[in-house]
Amino acid sequence: MTTPAPKTTMTTKNINAMNRRAWLGAAALALSAGSGTAAFAQAAPYPSKPIKVVVPFAAGGATDVLARVLAEKMAVGLGQPMVIDNKPGAAGIIGTDAVAKAPPDGYTLLLGLSNSMLTNQFLYTKLPYSPERDIAPIYQIAIAPLVLVAHPSVPVATGPELLKYVVANKGKVAYGSYGTGAYPHLAGAYMSQSQNADMSHVAYRGEAPMVQDLLGGQIQIAFASALQVKPHLEAGKLKAIGVSGERRMGTLPNVPTLAEQGLNDEAYRVAGWLAFGAPAGTPPAILERIADEVRKATQLPDVAQRIAAMGFDVQSSSPALFSAAIAKERPVWERLIKASGAKLD
């Protein structure tokens, strides 16, 4: 005779226990799925979407042109489009500030100049960002030396001759710049002070009007870009005295640097530059990836030739080398700006 199996009574306690086990199982499954999604997201290769490159100057200028040339080449290696976003205004401050406040994920980059990435901190009393704290250096693309040019009426051909001339004509020489605190202003102010020449500074709203007044003889000397003055040099309407920075320009190989001529003061040996930056906190691996693509692009013959034609000196850089260059130049620019007395709100 078979003993019947005991009946199982489904109490409230049993049901609650079963529901709890089911809930825990579902929660574990959901957590596992969520963790898998997070792990997949973390493992997604960079970049996985378009990259925005902020140019803090208007479209059509040299910085914008260079940004578009590099973006086209770099997009191939990165496998994602690089979109140029022009944010001009306030000597590069508006665009640079936008990058400083962007997420540090590698999808917002800056292609700017030394003013917004270095010197503005000494010039402006109210800068909305700190170049040192808020911008991560990626790659110094090119050095941008300037040519010291003179009107043909100035009877000199070299740097030393010019220094003697401004001393002999104290208070009679005017130099131009395309903005207070820009290198042409700082170098001209240094020349005037160091020689006790009492030169007059004339600031213009841009380089083009400065060059036009130089051609017309309203000012006698100025530091200017090769891009602006090379045609006038070739036509004999202006004459080149020397080049700022450490090396001659590829586009003006016969014009010696001022340092070569014995003007070894640090004011004449520094030069502006163009560079890539990113929001501080961007992962080092991403900075290195971008730097590698910039290096590849600038080494392409057509790109290198185009940069040289602009009067720029192509650099071989990296986040570490760029950081070291900034650390070396920072005190020089700070001294020049303080000596000039330039200060802006």
Image (cartoon, grey):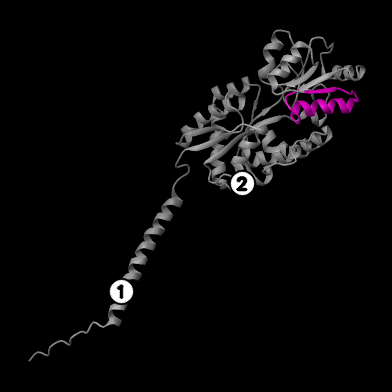
| Residue name at image x 29 percent, y 76 percent | 18
Q: Position of residue 19 (x, y in %)?
A: 30, 74
Q: Does residue 51 appear left or right of residue 258 in this picture?
A: left
Q: Which quadrant would residue 99 be assigned to in this image?
A: top right
Specify the quadrant that holds the C terminus: top right
Relative height, residue 15 to residue 149 (above, below): below
- The residue that label 1 is drawn on is 19
Q: Does residue 339 appear left or right of residue 274 in this picture?
A: right
Say which of marks 2 and 1 sits in front. Answer: 1
Name the mark on residue 280. Answer: 2
**For the residues marked 2 and 1, what is the alpha-carbon distance in whole angstroms?**
49 Å
Q: Position of residue 125 (x, y in %)?
A: 75, 41
| Residue name at image x 31 percent, y 78 percent | 16
Magenta-tinted stretch: 177-202
Callout 1 secondary element:
helix
Q: Residues within 10 Å of mark 2 (few under 14, many from 20)?
A: many
Q: Earlier in the sequence, mark 2 or mark 1?
A: 1
Q: Nearer the viewer, residue 177 or 140?
A: 177
Task: Say what amino acid the circle numbered 1 marks.
Answer: Asn
Farthest front residue in view: 345
Q: Nearer the viewer, residue 52 or 281?
A: 52
Callout 2 secondary element:
loop
Task: Say what amino acid the circle numbered 2 marks.
Answer: Ala
Farthest bottom residue in view: 1
Q: Position of residue 339 (x, y in %)?
A: 84, 34
Q: Position of residue 205 (x, y in %)?
A: 71, 24
For residue 207, say whether it is visible.
yes
Q: Does residue 24 appear left or right of residue 281 in this picture?
A: left
